[in-house]
Image: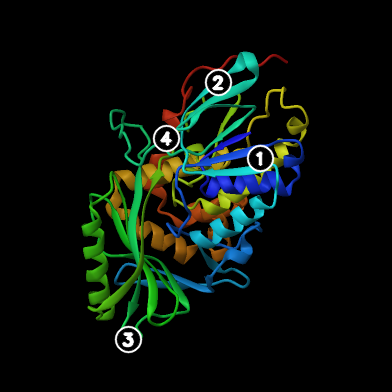
Amino acid sequence: MLIAGGGAAGLSCAVQLSLQGLTRFLRVLIIEPRSRYERDRTWCFWNVIPHPFEDCVSDSWHTWSVSDGQRRIDRSWPGLVYQHLPADVFYEKATSLLAADPNVELRLGDRVKRVESKPEDNQALAMTDEGPLTASLVLDSRPRGARLELDRSSRNAPGHFLQHFHGKTVRSEKPVFSAGVATIMDFVEARNDGIHFIYLLPYDERTALIEDTWFSDEPRPVESYEEEISRYLADRFDVVRYEALHSETGAIPMDPRPIEPPDGPRQIDIGTRGGAARPSTGYAFLSIQRFAAALARGLTGWAHDPSQEPPRPPRHYSRRSVFLDRVFVSHLARTPEAGPDLFLRLFDRVRPDALARFLFDGGLPLDDLRVMAALPAAPLIGETLRQYAALPGAGEPREPSVP
């Protein structure tokens, strides 16, 4: 088996294949373009499901807030914790686990350029920088690209944009941060060209990760994010001098359109490529962990006889959640200036445990009902009808059922 890309998804899938014993029957090769791992990102989530990397969590907060400069909502719930997991700690644990498995190889400094199916041979062909490779199955996490092709041609087309951000870990000369509270969203200003907010995780009273975050059509220059961070520190905390310890940049598709299927039965798309990032929020880490565990369980029988066609992979999100995301993201794309109020309503009116499950998509239909009840009815009903009308086959006459 070949895993194209050794990021969060590729390594998590490999770890689950090893932990669940499939590598006794399969050799697994992971090909990763980077030559070394470093802290290139941060994953955060609520502790709503168990996973193999719980001991990699470095910081946690029992209280979190959202605000818009006029209103501030602080929330907490017994047993519910917002957690921070730095990428370098994750990479270290994942690679250590895999290094102990003799049937797993991690090849750094190589790149999968193309994957083709060879159905006649029950294999897939991967073209790498170092030459061609064949595999009984390819798990493909290669990014599709951050820039979106926006389709506004249809009145009912679902809206979609990017969640893009640049963040810095800063150390202030004076204690200014509330160390016990994670700021999930602090909306800087209402805009009609996107949704703009600051995300702030305080590690102590002087040190915090601050990310300038946007929901809009395309990323901004790094200098623009940094200017916003400096302005925020000056306006909110009266901090003009600080030490920058670390920085990170990212862009996550908030796109509820169906994910393009892979080219053949011997390919499975994973990670963001396979739809791991929830379109309405961008959260992905827990979805990746749930998917990786379910994928390994589903491949258990196939691993004994890889000449069989592999089973279909698990879904990252239920059809119900996908449709709700389609409605929500499309409404945000049409009326971005309403975004701050929508998110404040969610955190204010939905029970914290239900909202955390909803944002991750590990909840029940009752959680969805609580979320829908918290949002303004009229515009969301109109958006729901528009998106239902845009579904494939909507409005077409159905064949009568045969008794």
Relative vertical location of residue 222 with respect to residue 186 in this rendering, above or below: above
Disc assigned to residue 60: none
The disc, 3 or 4, on the residue closer to the chain's N-terminal end is 3
Amino acid type shown at disc 1 = Leu
Q: Position of residue 158 (x, y in %)?
A: 38, 36
Is residue 117 visible in the rendered structure shown here?
Answer: yes
Q: Which residue is mark 3?
A: 174
For disc 4, the marked residue is 387
Q: Nearer the viewer, mark 2 or mark 1?
A: 2
State yes or no: discs 2 and 1 in contact (Cβ < 8 Å): no
Per the image, the residue denoted by label 2 is 117
Total labels: the figure holds 4
Of mark 2 and mark 1, the one earlier in the sequence is: 2
Element at label 2: strand
Q: Nearer the viewer, residue 134 or 177?
A: 134
Secondary element at tag 3: loop
* Percent x, y of residue 77: 58, 71
In 3D space, how far apart are the residues under numbered discs 3 and 4 (Cα atoms)?
Answer: 50 Å
Ranked by sequence position, the earlier of labels 3 and 1 is 3
Q: Earlier in the sequence, mark 4 or mark 1?
A: 1
- Mark yes or no: residue 291 visible: no
- Foreground tag (2 vs 4): 2
Determine which quarter of the picture holds residue 150.
Answer: top left
Which residue is depicted at the point 63% across and 66% down? 55
Badge nearest the viewer, 3 or 2? 2
Residues at marks 3 and 1, CA–CA distance in whole angstroms:
48 Å
Q: Is residue 32 left or right of residue 219?
A: right
Determine which residue is flagged by label 1: 295
**SS of the residue under disc 1:** helix
